[in-house]
Image: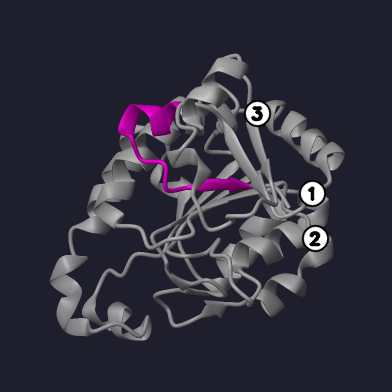
């Protein structure tokens, strides 16, 4: 399959996977090295229009991007996330490491906000790019360290505002694009007007996600983010964040 696809495409061509018989398979791991987008729809024309708009989007800047840190910074934060506070030593170094990455890539501390449900809502309404870092999540819920949560119904309540703003949402959060009988956070965002959602179907490790995030910030600051993500994936070999378009 990989060879046949490679022979029939130019290296710069995006690959679009519509619907498909094996939706749970991460196609980026099969068709690596390219822009690969997924859709549950089988309507090719609107999906191609969305891809064109993604290629036309401006690079990431501190002004058009909101970075929301959902990493626990204390044992109490971990407990509010519903996790074992005794495991905080596994998380303790992560916020500083990610913070340093953000600063190294030219994004000031003001670009990063502690993630809460209200801050997530504000970002969806006002920013072109919304990045949620390492939130504890299930397919249909984002959990934040202050104890607040975001579920599909909360996103649905912002539908008109999301549709007007059309953000691209990057969820470095486990299983937020998972295929199941329950509508995922990613599906709801797309149904409510997000231009795209970049999110994993599987669990992800924060330590392995940081090199991808670091490269993405650097490479997407000088080109459309969709190609910046491709180049960051190729640089790190991490293809866990799938791109979804409706």
Q: Specify start and end residues of the magenta stretch as a single range.
A: 231-244
Is residue 11 one of those drawn in magenta? Answer: no
Check disc 3 and report the residue beneath it: 58
Check disc 2 and report the residue beneath it: 161
Q: Earlier in the sequence, mark 1 or mark 2?
A: 1
Q: Earlier in the sequence, mark 3 or mark 2?
A: 3
Q: Earlier in the sequence, mark 1 or mark 3?
A: 1
Q: In percent of the image, x 43 and y 40: which residue is there?
A: 29
Spatial CA distance of label 1 from label 2 is 26 Å
- The picture places residue 121, in percent across and down from the top left corner, at 64, 66
Rendered view: 121 above or below 167: below
Check disc 1 and report the residue beneath it: 42
Category of crowding for the residue at label 3, using alpha-carbon neighbours closer than 10 angstroms: few (below 14), some (14–19), many (at least 20): some
- The picture places residue 23, in percent across and down from the top left corner, at 59, 56
Rendered view: 134 above or below 155: above
Q: Secondary structure at mark 3?
A: loop
Q: Secondary structure at mark 1?
A: loop
Q: In percent of the image, x 62 and y 57: which residue is there?
A: 123
């Amino acid at each position: 399959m990989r060879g046949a696809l490679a022979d029939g495409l130019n290296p710069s061509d995006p690959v679009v996977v519509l619907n498909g018989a094996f939706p749970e398979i991460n196609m980026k791991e099969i068709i690596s090295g390219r822009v690969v987008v997924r859709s549950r729809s089988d309507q090719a024309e609107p999906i191609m229009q969305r891809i064109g708009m993604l290629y036309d989007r401006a690079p990431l800047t501190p002004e058009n991007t909101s970075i929301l840190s959902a990493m626990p910074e204390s044992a109490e934060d971990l407990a509010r996330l519903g996790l074992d506070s005794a495991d905080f030593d596994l998380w303790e170094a992560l916020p500083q490491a990610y913070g340093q990455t953000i600063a190294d890539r030219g994004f000031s501390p003001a670009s990063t906000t502690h993630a809460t449900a209200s801050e997530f809502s504000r970002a969806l309404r006002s920013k072109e790019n919304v990045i949620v870092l390492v939130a504890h999540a299930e397919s249909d819920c984002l959990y934040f360290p202050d104890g607040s949560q975001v579920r599909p119904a909360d996103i649905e309540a912002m539908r008109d505002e999301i549709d007007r703003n059309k953000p691209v949402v990057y969820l470095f959060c486990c299983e937020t694009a998972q295929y199941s009988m329950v509508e995922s956070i990613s599906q709801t965002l797309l149904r409510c007007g997000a231009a795209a959602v970049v999110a994993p179907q599987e669990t992800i490790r924060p330590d392995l996600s940081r090199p991808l995030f670091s490269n993405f910030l650097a490479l997407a600051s000088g080109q459309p983010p969709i190609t910046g993500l491709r180049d960051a994936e190729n640089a790190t070999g991490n293809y866990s964040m799938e791109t979804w378009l409706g």
